[in-house]
Amino acid sequence: MNARLEFFEDEPIIAAVKSEEQLMRAIASDCNVIFFLFGNICNISSLVQRVADAGKHAMVHVDLINGLAAKEIAADFIRSYTKADGVISTKPQLLRHAREVGLITVLRVFVLDSMALDNIDKLRSACNPDFLELVPGIAPKVIQLVHSLYRTPIIAGGLIRDKEDTMSALSAGALSISTSCEAAWKEMGVS
């Protein structure tokens, strides 16, 4: 794995946070990677700074940050005004630019049917992301299939609620899981 991505290797659980209160609990946990699923252009810099000050890694889901458009300039903003390690998005063009400016990239793909599954290669080819985040993450057969088709590391996200869901996703080939379910952080001994 690329040296700038190595911190993901030993992180089976990624804390996905939806509020400042949850962010504080994630910072206090043993989770070393935090996905921001909330924020706005006025507070994202200070929120990410808290994660950096705790010696942890922050990834910002730019599609969910109020005030940021899902355009290339969003990657420039994150790079210039925050200490985030990378970005998450469903937009290949944005991720391609984020990669060009040195951010780690996560392409979030909603695998809801066979058309979405077939579309993964096109999306992946358009931006060459560092990671694919497959949502929902509770479909081990889909994770296993995508893992067998592509060399891009997989993060399973969405609807993961317990140790069984986590172990199923990891056994199917996911490198990590992302979850906002704090009980899942604790069941894996990560909190």
Image (cartoon, rainbow, N blue to C red):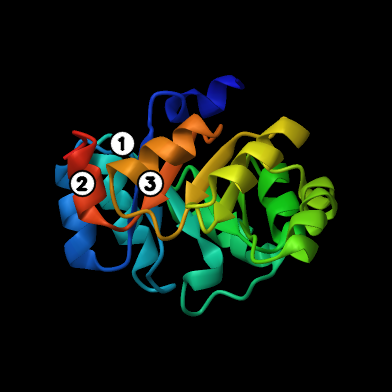
Question: What residue type is disc 2 on?
Answer: Ile
The image quadrant of residue 101 is top right
Q: Earlier in the sequence, mark 1 or mark 3?
A: 1
Q: Is residue 37 above or below residue 191?
A: below
Q: Are marks 1 and 3 in contact (CB under 8 Å)?
A: no
Mark nearer the N terminus (2 vs 1): 2
Amino acid type shown at disc 1: Asn
Which image quarter is the N terminus in?
Answer: top right
The label on residue 132 is none
Q: Residue at x 30, y 59 (%)?
A: 47
Residue at the disc numbered 1: 32
> In percent of the image, x 60 and y 65: which residue is there?
74
Q: CA distance from mark 3 to mark 2?
A: 23 Å
Distance (Cα) linking label 1 and label 3: 20 Å
- The disc placed on residue 165 is 3
- Disc 2 secondary structure class: helix
